[in-house]
Amino acid sequence: MISMRGVAKSFRGMPVLRNVTFDVNEGESVVLLGRSGSGKSVTLRNILGIIKPDQGKVIVDNQNVSELDLDELYPLRRKIGMLFQNAALWDSMNVYENVALALQHHAVVPRREIPARVKECLTLVGLGEDSIAKRMPSELSGGMKKRVGLARAIAVFPKYMLYDEPTTGLDPIMASIIDKLIRELNTSLKVTSLTITHDMNSAFTIADRIVMLHRGEIIFSGSVDEVKNSDDPVVHQFIHGDPDGPIKPIYTDHYEKRQAHQ
Ligand SMILES: Nc1ncnc2c1ncn2[C@@H]1O[C@H](COP(=O)(O)OP(=O)(O)O)[C@@H](O)[C@H]1O
Ligand SMILES: [Mg+2]
């Protein structure tokens, strides 16, 4: 289980997270929705222990992440697979080597079983052909890079998967293929998943439960149906992206602050 309790985080006096509380239960697929710049990636970095909260707690697998030293943090991070926004493949290694690298590093399967494990994971993401394994990242489309990133992340049998904007920059068809894949991995491999996105369609495909981050707080938590049926005007604006409504463009935040100081 991943659990954030009253997490606050500021950068140079500017609060990004004010009071973030939500859980991702075992086996669940939770989508964290928030607008650009709302602190979604900051939330993920708190979960990975890359940054520490100013206040509150982050609990992953019954461990308080912010209290762990590096020796304790590494074994915990090994349980967490991460798909980064840019897929983050090694440009000088081919597809096979990119996926095999994590397996060589973490020794989760005997060395002789690495080729079979790489093949298995590439097949899971629809890239099982031998010709693809030999390609360099520069010879892959954006969607294929994401899928290789996904194969690499799941190769080490993570208990948790974190996805940072997995479909940003992809065309709608490729985006929905990736969304479905994330959902399938959650159900077939029983990986507890947290996906961060600002894309409502992705959220509806991937999520058991959707939580919404707004102004540094979780303003809503509910199932896909609860989101669709909500009459909360903030939730409504999140879904439909209306320019008018209770959510104002980010710049009004600064405007309001200036007004408050006058
Ligand atoms: N290390 C940092 N130092 C200063 N500001 C940061 C840092 N990381 C994030 N921020 C700021 O926090 C805000 C939220 O960032 P982020 O979590 O990346 O947003 P998003 O929801 O788009 O992922 C942004 O205004 C960003 O500039
Ligand atoms: Mg981000």
Image (tube, rainbow, N blue to C red):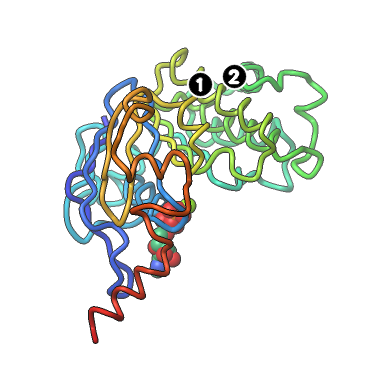
Residue at the extreme top? 188
How many marks on residues? 2
Task: Give the number of the mark in front: 1 or 2.
Answer: 2
Q: Nearer the viewer, residue 153 or 71?
A: 153
Residue 131 lies, in percent from the top left, at 82, 24
Q: Nearer the viewer, residue 192 or 202?
A: 202
Q: Amino acid at mark 2?
A: Arg
| Mark found first going from the N terminus, 1 or 2 | 1
Q: Is residue 262 above or below residue 206?
A: below
Q: State the quadrant of the N terminus.
A: top left
Q: CA distance from mark 1 to mark 2?
A: 8 Å
Q: Which mark is on residue 187?
A: none
Reading the image, the residue beneath label 1 is 109
Residue 38 lies, in percent from the top left, at 39, 55
Residue 17 lies, in percent from the top left, at 28, 57
Q: Quadrant of ligand 1?
A: bottom left
Q: Which mark is on residue 117?
A: 2
Residue depicted at x 26% and y 44%: 219
Q: Amino acid at mark 1?
A: Val
Is there a contact, CB below 8 Å, between mark 1 and mark 2? Answer: yes
Q: Quadrant of residue 72?
A: top left
Query: Is 160 situated left or right of 83 in this image?
Result: left
Give the crowd class for mark 2: few <14, some 14-19, many >=20 residues within 10 Å: some
Q: Is residue 223 above or below residue 51?
A: above
Q: Quadrant of residue 26?
A: top left
Query: Is 2 situated left or right of 186 in this image?
Result: left
